[in-house]
Image (cartoon, rainbow, N blue to C red):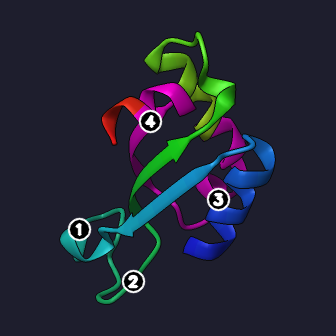
Amino acid sequence: MSEALQNKLQQVLRAEHVDIVDNSWMHAGHASNPTPGATGTHLAVTVVSPEFEGLSLLDRHRLVHKALKEEFAGTLHALELKTFSPAEWESRN
């Protein structure tokens, strides 16, 4: 699932960098992740995209959620998002 999400974010948001960490194991047994060993339900995602330039944090998150609408209709339950414009990313690194 991570590779498919990465490809989608790169295509839809023209993302220059995408990092995905699957934290589903931390939620095993919860109502949103009742199956032990299930993956792809809770993800920590860092996205660097020129589409975020000049947008508020909320608007950036809305763009990511819109891009992953199909995944949320399936097994994806929660995202921990970090979103940066290329300039912000460069200044952090």
Percent x, y of residue 88? 44, 27
Locate the C terminus by quadrant.
top left
Residue 57 place in picture, x, y as percent: 45, 19
* Label 4 CA crowd tier, 10 Å (few <14, some 14–19, many 20+): few
For disc 3, the neighbor class at 10 Å (few under 14, some 14 to 19, many from 20) is some
Disc number placed over residue 71 in the picture, else none: 3
- Amino acid bearing label 3: Glu
User: Badge 1 is on which residue?
Assistant: 27
Residue at 45% of width from left, 56% of height from top?
A: 77
41 and 57: which one is in front? 57
Q: Earlier in the sequence, mark 4 or mark 3?
A: 3
Residue 52: in sight, yes or no? yes
The mark that comes first in sequence, 3 or 1, is 1
SS assignment at label 4: helix
Q: CA distance from mark 1 to mark 4?
A: 33 Å
Magenta residues, start to end: 65-90
Q: In the picture provided, is 93 more to the left or to the right than 19?
A: left
Q: CA distance from mark 4 to mark 3?
A: 29 Å
Q: Which residue is mark 4?
A: 90
Label 3 sits on a secondary structure element that is helix
Which numbered disc, 2 or 4, marks the residue that appears first in the sequence?
A: 2
Residue labelled with disc 2 = 38
